[in-house]
Amino acid sequence: MGQRITGGLPAEFVWGAATASYQVEGAVGEDGRGPSIWDTFCRTPGRVVLGHTGEVTADQYHRYREDITLMRELGLKRYRFSIAWPRVFPTGSGAPNPKGFDYYNRLIDALLAAGIEPVVTLYHWDLPQALEDAGGWPARDSAYRFGEYAELCYRELGDRVSSWITLNEPFCAAILGYLYGVHAPGERDRPAAYRAVHHLLLGHGLALKAFRDGAYRGDIGITLNTQTPRPATQRDEDRAAAERASDLQTHMFLDPLMGGSYPERHLAAYPEVQMPVERGDMELIGQPIDFLGLNWYFEEVAAADADHPEGFRLCRQYQETTEMGWPVVPKGFYRHLRWLEGYTTGMPIYVTENGCAAPDELDRDGTRCHDPRRIAYLREHIAALRDAWRDGVNVKGYYVWSFIDNFEWAYGFTKRFGVVYCDYLDQRRVPKDSFYFYRDVVAGHE
Ligand code: GCO
């Protein structure tokens, strides 16, 4: 596992920071970018707090060089960002947009010049609207379009990218987007949502096969936001409830990706759902990946509830909460990493997101942002990660969410996750105290 350095993690452990295209780029109508489902969702009254949109956000499309200077000051080894599919394929397929790739070529070249490795997420929720109009993720064709888009990205950028992530949190894309309706495209249709689950995973499989067939450099994986709620009590019924509470967000995705099948126990609760599996699909989805990306923020508590179709309910807990109302449970991070290690029999894991929303404000002269709660959150969760590594979990890296304050989906700009404060009025960047804390972590001083 390599020699230990200060802080108890190996020298080759990779420290990074993460963002996503729709959340930081802005420039939604520039250089040929086509509309995405999030552009449409933001324009639909009542969908996003205060009618906020990603039209400008942190304007990284124009300010990426300034941001990379700050990333270099942090000492980052990697920067995880996503490609906006509608920038490179304005209608999702057909003729690619050269200006779209031009931006990502400049971004990648500037990162490499700063000694920072690019980690590219192919899909972080900004589906081209034209594909949604053609059926979206509930339609099988979207999976094929995604495989084609992925192959083009490998061809254009693959000579310089260290690590590829096919999908970010397919749970959110499918379930928040098509079942709960709180994310784009805002549908509420369980059978459609479960078709979206399968076609997102099929798209992952097609993209993975294209990567292997093309023998591209670097490694490839997928990012999930798996969760394993803890039982409210040690009574058998609560322990069983906690198991069931992870079926949709964890097992519906992790099991097929590990070569298994969709959890029948979960599907049995919803007879109206039919997973649209065709011959060969599960083999494509279950192909080996090089790593599993984990986005983790908090741990739930589950108890038995006969009134719920799956027999569980989520319970309140005592921990303090972040600005998102998420409980701060670093021990839960340790527990989940250990569980994941066992369930995937030692699959390499990158924590591709972890962080917290805090009530960030600039001080009077606008040059500092004191965020002690974020520092405490990061310190406790990095310590939990180090303990998990020490106890055998093959965790290879940690990318803080997020490098900079950005568009927090349906919460708009009301939630700040960055270690860099973004003043959306004048686009000033102000490193928060947590920026300097994280710099010390990366340098091995913490
Ligand atoms: C997610 C997304 C990020 C969010 C972050 C905070 O994990 O939901 O990948 O885009 O902004 O997690 O909610």
Image (spheres, grey):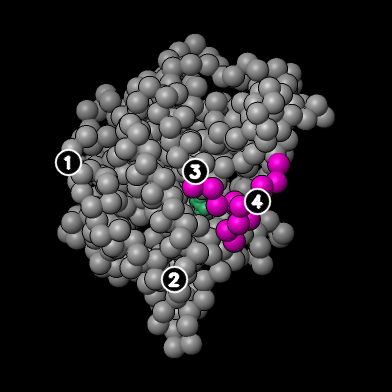
Disc 2 designates what residue?
A: 421
Magenta stretch bounds: 315-330
**In this view of the protein, can residue 32 be seen by the observer?**
no
State the quadrant of the C terminus. bottom left
Q: Earlier in the sequence, mark 2 or mark 4?
A: 4
Q: Amino acid at mark 3?
A: Lys
Q: Position of residue 66 (x, y in %)?
A: 30, 70
420 over 192 or under it: above or below: below
Q: Is residue 324 magenta?
A: yes
Q: Gap in Å between the C-alphas at discs 1 and 4? A: 38 Å
Q: Please, what is the dominant secondary structure of the magenta stretch?
A: loop
Mark whose residue sits in front, 2 or 1: 1
Q: Gap in Å between the C-alphas at discs 2 and 3? A: 28 Å
State the quadrant of the N terminus. top left
Q: Position of residue 420 (x, y in %)?
A: 40, 68
Q: Earlier in the sequence, mark 1 or mark 4?
A: 1
Question: Camera-side residue: 31 or 211?
Answer: 211
